Amino acid sequence: MKVLSLFDGISCGRLALERSGIQVDEYVAYEIDESAIKISKKNWPDIQHKGDVTKADFTEYQHFDLLIGGSPCQSLSIIQAHKRQNLKGKSKLFFEFVRAMEEMKPKYFLFENVASMNEESKQTISELLGCQPILINANCFLPQDRPRLFWTNIPVEVDKLQECSAKLRDIMQKDVPEKYFYNYTLEGVDMAKKVCAHVVCKNLEMHRRVYNPEHKVGCLTAVCGGGQHRKILDGGRARKMTVLEYERCQGLTDGYTAGVSDSQSYKAIGNGWPVPVIAHVFTGLKDKQ
Ligand SMILES: C[S@@+](CC[C@H](N)C(=O)[O-])C[C@H]1O[C@@H](n2cnc3c(N)ncnc32)[C@H](O)[C@@H]1O
């Protein structure tokens, strides 16, 4: 199968194709983030990187089979609801996906984005892509809550999907170095029945959300600066989740993002696709090769 991937990030789509047993004859990626490209190249030396999507002539790919992509979601996401610009903000890059559909006319396509976008954006995307989205939460496969919308003409089995039993405890790293731990007050917080607790950081007088390893973590995001990493309770103490734990929560292979700084890894993983979800979608291509 020949694949064109827009907003390719760290090529989670390529890994998902491999996981679902789809033969990839050619994979062309458009991505501009240097660290993401470095991670992609390390894992997939065969991928052809082409850079900025706005400069592309998609008529070159008319013989390709599959178009995939999840455009930047910042201006669609609930995370920035107070200043949300919807499809007029950074997320307007979605229209590049539409242009690719028109110029390339792929047999199959998959467009992914956040489930928290407003109804108007959802309708616009559905009209332009010619189908309604399906909602899949990564919690069906992974210890992470990550509901996402998928517009696709690949037949996808969704009726039998349900939350799986995987929890944070299953992917936790052992013997995590001291530098990951925070000086948070957890006294008086009964974590037993909680998915996460808001605790007070002693020094900073700030409230932080700490996840219970017996549950799933909230959606990993690319917003990792200023102490925004997901936090986990480990031996009664709060600590930052490690890069390895981030990779596992997205269904990547261990060390997939190694070779860039930790902050670039956290960002790239938070931006990425949960691999088993995408692999599940691609399973519908198995008899179409
Ligand atoms: C939500 S992320 C997609 C991540 C990807 N699905 C993955 O599995 O890693 C959006 C990506 O679009 C990239 N991007 C932003 N502007 C772009 C442009 N003009 N051309 C190509 N990629 C761009 C960002 O660098 C970011 O990696």
Image (spheres, helix red, strand yellow):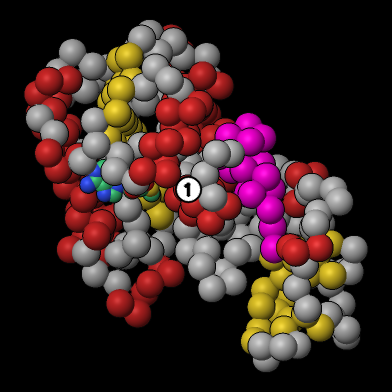
Q: In the image, is residue 70 above or below residue 196?
A: above
Relative to 191, 161 lies left or right:
left
**Percent x, y for residue 260?**
52, 44
* Residues in magenta, as a range: 240-257
Residue at the limit of the structure toward the bottom, as seen here: 205
Residue 136 lies in magenta, yes or no?
Answer: no
Looking at the rendering, which quadrant does residue 34 occupy? Answer: top left
> Residue 245: within the magenta?
yes
* Number of numbered markers: 1
The amino acid type found where label 1 is placed reads Ala
**Residue pointed to by mark 1:** 268
Label 1 beta carbon within 8 A of ligand 1: yes
Camera-side residue of 107 and 53? 53
**Residue 171 versus residue 88 in the image, above or below:** above
Most foreground residue, 251 or 258:
258
The image quadrant in which ligand 1 is located: top left
Q: Is residue 123 visible?
A: yes
Q: Residue at x 58, y 39 (%)?
A: 258
Q: Is residue 132 visible?
A: no
In which quadrant will I find the C terminus?
top left
Specify whether 257 is left or right of 120. Answer: right
Q: Secondary structure at mark 1?
A: helix
The residue at the point 41 percent across, 68 percent down is: 78
